[in-house]
Image: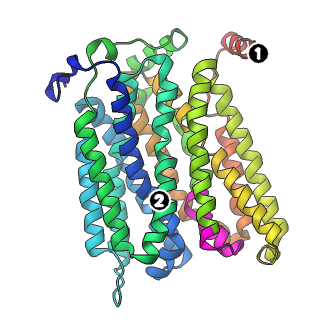
Amino acid sequence: MTSTTFSPSHSLPPRHRWKVLAAGVAANAAFSVAFSGIPMTAVLMRSGYQLDNATLGLVLGLMGLGIAVSELPWGLLTDRWGDRPVLLLGLGATALALAAMALWAAPVAGHIPGLGLLGGGLLLVGLLGGSVNGASGRAVMTWFAPGERGLAMSIRQTAVPLGGGIGALVLPWLALHAGFAALYGVLALLCALSAWMAWAWVHEPPPERAAQPPAASTAALAATAARTGPLRDPRVWRIVAGIGILCAPQFAVLSFGTVFLHDFGHAGLGTITAAMVAVQVGAMVMRVWSGRWTDRRGNRPAYLRACSGLSLLLFAALALLALAAGPQAADSAALRIALVLLLAACGVCVSAWHGVAYTELATLAGAARAGTALGMANTSVFLVCFVTPFSIPHLLALQGWPLVWLAASACALVAMPLLVPAQAPAKRANTASSLST
């Protein structure tokens, strides 16, 4: 599809790339308020819809399942159609689905919607909202130069914790004081506003910007990926698997962190909200910093290894603290504070690496195939998003919260060698030498 189909992109100045980035951030943030924010209302959803923990986990996972199923098809369509039509179609349809949930899937006095309406609505929102990530990521890759892509992609990835922070701050209050109908209505409005921004600002770049080559150190890898296609490149699949597995601890915090603090730590709504907002704000700051830092130093693989290793240690520490605290967590203010702080540290660390990993993946695949590669990654991510909240109640039934956080630590251990493609010995030695200087 040519760039002139939608806009006079030849006349757009280079600085327009920041508007494209802003539209991508808005699109991801609007949808993130939904998929990261709705789990922040888990305690209220459990009581409002009269669910047990197992059913709550299933319902919270359905939106992630919808995203997982749709991400790769949306990514393929993005590479075929372009960023703009996919963003407009996906965001507009997501807004309509959320509006429908406000009308028919919200509990009101004397009526609780059936599980099918709630679960089906969240599944549909996930199916439609899966359009956002691949399309906005491809826009970043085509508009920004190779030396800017780590920062730009990390800024775009801050939209996820930004939306999650807004969701953690606003959605529990909305659900408590105005009900779930108002909550779904606000989410629909946010998606509609971000669709307007995509219509106004997202266009294909001029040919001279779209044709920029990758950096010399990754040119050969990108050329190979372009010839074989991301779907047939084992190196792409390796990173895709690592990204998905390392997201399991993150989704454990986002989906059941509020339940953990409420049921195990006996924290109040204000403390829980503050902890979840801290996780999202900390993740935003770390994503921007890490993108800029790794752009300057060229050390994305080392950074990804460090995030995996630190996540492993932090979740293991949280498991040990939960095991040591036992029933006394409810009686000790010091233990409660320690649990809140350690959970927040775990959430920040395991959310800090996304922009760097997605930049590494998109660079390997090449800008022309970035939509497909990012769709693959997000299929992996949101399959994990479905499996994680579905699995946590079963782990709780076996050995309680220490087993949940120990499993999260194990996921970080498994992901560590997958996030960085295998290198030839000579290249590995050169990389280590450059990092030490």
Q: Residue 262, how many percent across, how many down? A: 64, 73
Q: Locate the N terminus by quadrant.
A: top left
Amino acid under disc 1: Ser
Q: Is residue 264 left or right of residue 182?
A: right
Which residue occupies the extreme right position in the image? 324
Q: Is residue 72 left or right of residue 424?
A: left
At a point 45% along the width and 80% down the height, the residue shown is 48
Magenta: main secondary structure equals helix
Q: Which residue is mark 1?
A: 436
Q: Which residues are magenta?
A: 253-270
Please give the count of numbered marks on the rendered protein.
2
SS type, badge 1: helix
Q: Is residue 313 above or below residue 433?
A: below
Color encoding of the figure: rainbow
Q: Residue 324, how many percent across, how many down? A: 85, 66
Q: Is residue 283 above or below residue 368?
A: below
Q: How far apart are labels 2 and 1 at the CA level?
A: 41 Å
Residue 184 appears anywhere in the view? yes
Q: Residue 83, how many percent across, how many down? A: 28, 33
Q: Which residue is mark 2?
A: 167
At a point 65% along the width and 14% down the height, the residue shown is 424
